[in-house]
Amino acid sequence: MHDVVLQELEDHLAGNASPAFHAHLAECGDCRTEVESFARISGLMAELRSAPETAPTPSPFFYTRVAATIVESQNTNHWGLLAPGAAFFRRVAFASLLLLAGLGSYLAMREGQIVDYAGTDAATIMAQHDVTAMHAESSDRDMMLVALASYGE
C-alpha cells in the first residue's frame, strides 16, 4: 500500500477521506483491492458490535474447560518432566506393585531352601555338610570355623 492510503485509511473507514485519497484509489488497483477488503472487515466488525443479541452463546462449562486447558498447558510447559500427568504416576505405582509382588514371590520360594544353623550344635552342622554338592569356598570356611569353635567344648 502507498503512503497516502496508509495515512488516510482510518479516515476513509470513518467516511471522511480526502479527495487525494479517492483519486489515488481510482488510479491504483492494488490499493483499491486492499481498501475494499479492509472496508469489508470493518463492516463485519461493526455488525458484530451493533447486534450483541445475535452473538453466539457458549455451551455450558465452556469457560471451565478453557480455564482447565490453560492451566494444564501452563503446567506442562513450565515443568516438563518434573510435573507429568496423573497417568504417569499411575503407571509408576502399578510397576512398583508388580516389582514388589515379583520380589515377594521370589523370597517366598527361597525361604524353604535356606538352611538355618542357629541353635544347632557343631556335630549336627558337620553331619549336614554335603561334600559332593557344589558350593562356594566361603561356606567351607564357615563350617570349619564352627568345627573349631566347638572343638574346645
Image (cartoon, rainbow, N blue to C red):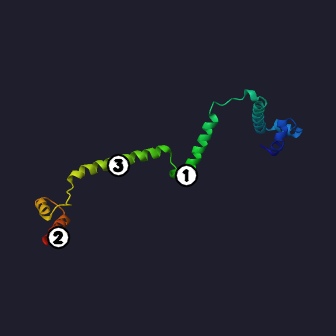
Label 3 with label 1: CB-CB less than 8 Å: no
Identity of the amino acid at label 2?
Ala
Q: Which structural element holds mark 1?
A: helix
Quadrant (top left, top right, bottom left, bottom right) of the N terminus: top right
Is mark 2 in CB contact (under 8 Å) with mark 3?
no
- Considering depth in this image, is 32 or 10 the residue closer to the camera? 10
Read off the residue under disc 3: 100
Using residue 14 as the reference point, say whether residue 141 is left or right of it.
Answer: left
Q: Which residue is mark 2?
A: 149
On the rendered structure, is 36 left or right of 142? Answer: right
Badge 2 or badge 3: first in the primary sequence: 3
The x, y position of residue 86, in whole percent, is 49, 44
- Distance, label 1 to label 2, CA atoms, is 62 Å
Question: Is 64 in front, or is 9?
Answer: 64
Q: Secondary structure at mark 3?
A: helix
Tell me where residue 43 appears, x and y as whole percent. 78, 32
Residue position marked by numbered label 1 in the rendering: 79
Left or right of residue 2, residue 96 in this image: left
The span from disc 2 to disc 3 (Cα, nearest Å) is: 40 Å
Q: Amino acid at mark 1?
A: Trp
Q: Residue furthest front?
A: 153
Between circles 1 and 2, the one closer to the viewer is: 2
